Amino acid sequence: MLFRSLDDAGVVDLRLTRKVISVHKRTLDDERLRRHSKSSDWVDVHVGSEDDLPFLAELAELAAAAHR
């Protein structure tokens, strides 16, 4: 499962892998993203406006590619 739910308005859960998290540290170092825990593959992506949609799409593509 790559996408779990919309927890709150504007928060999307995405499942990345540890490898994706490790390789893409710079991309993931963003105030719109929060990891569930240090050992978790799940991240919360905060989408506050349409301007955040490209960031969400980029993360969704990383997640999808990691699970192919």
Image (cartoon, grey):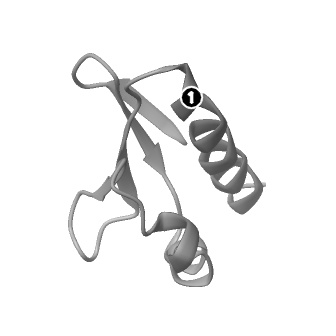
Residue 45 on image: x %, y %:
39, 42
- Residue at position x 54%, y 42% in the image: 2
Q: Is residue 51 left or right of residue 28?
A: right
Task: Please tell me which residue lies in front, 56 or 4.
Answer: 56
In this rendering, the answer to whether 1 lies above or below 63 is above
- Residue at position x 60%, y 75% in the image: 24
In this rendering, the answer to whether 17 lies above or below 16 is below
In this rendering, the answer to whether 18 lies above or below 62 is below
- Residue at position x 54%, y 76% in the image: 26
Q: Secondary structure at mark 1?
A: helix
- Residue at position x 49%, y 35% in the image: 3
Amino acid identity at mark 1: Asp
Residue 13 on image: x %, y %:
38, 38
Among the 4 quarters of the image, the one containing residue 65 = bottom right
Residue 4 on image: x %, y %:
40, 32
Write down the residue under mark 1.
Answer: 51
